[in-house]
Image: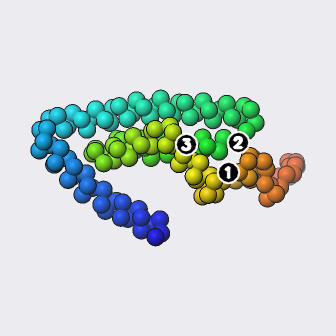
Amino acid sequence: MKIVQILFLFFLTVPFIEIYLLLQIGGIIGVFPTIFMVVFTAMLGAWLLRKQGLATWLRFQESINKGIVPAYEMIEGPILLVGGALLLTPGFFTDAIGFACLVPGLRKKIARYVIENKLVTPTGFQQDGTPSHHVIEGEYEKKDGDKTP
């Protein structure tokens, strides 16, 4: 199945799942507690996203300072962004997926899977962080007649 088909199905089915869950939970605990839970999970998610995002950013900077390609952190960043967007979307199903994206152990497993299966690799680098053979090094010298900035 192509990624476009998967995204289409996701965007088609998720609203129905969310409406169903909101109606079911609202029928059990009431309207105002349901609204409170939706708002609370959004606020909790924003706080956790900030905390996890800062930790990932610090690990990213630490890897850069050590001269190591921060491959895991580059994969974890977009996972955190998706998780944050899902947590800000009202509903319980998207909140569950969003919170799953914020769990550090699960996020690392997803990043490891992406890297080990070479779904994404940093440009110019192999998996172990060494430069690939596709990198061309050179020098550039600007001459007086060049109009480029």
Instruction: Locate residue 87 relative to residue 60 in the image: left or right.
Output: left
User: What residue is drawn where x is 79% and y is 59%?
Assistant: 134
Which disc number belongs to residue 108?
A: 3
Badge 2 marks a residue whose secondary structure is loop
Q: Earlier in the sequence, mark 1 or mark 3?
A: 3
> Which x, y percent locates residue 42?
32, 36
- On the image, the x and y values in percent for residue 110 come to 53, 48
**Residue linked to disc 1:** 122
Q: Residue 117, located in which quarter of the rendered image?
A: bottom right
CA separation, marks 2 and 3? 16 Å
Residue at the far bottom in the pictured view: 1
Residue 76 visible at all: no
Left-right relation of 105 to 137? left
Q: Are marks 2 and 1 in contact (CB under 8 Å)?
A: yes
Measured as percent of width and height from the top left, residue 145 is found at: 86, 52
The image's colour scheme reads rainbow
Residue at the location (73% across, 38% down)?
68
Rate crowding at label 2 as few (under 14), some (14 to 19) or many (20 or more) other CA atoms within 10 Å: many
Three-letter amino acid code at the position of disc 3: Lys
* Vertical position of residue 20 compared to residue 26: above or below: below
Q: For marks 2 and 1, give the CA distance.
A: 8 Å
Residue at point 61%, 43% (across, down): 72
Residue 74 location, quadrant: top right
Q: CA distance from mark 1 to mark 3?
A: 17 Å
Q: What's the residue type where badge 1 is placed?
A: Pro
Quick one: SS at disc 1? loop
User: Residue 69 shows which numbered tag?
Assistant: 2
Q: Nearer the viewer, residue 145 or 82?
A: 82
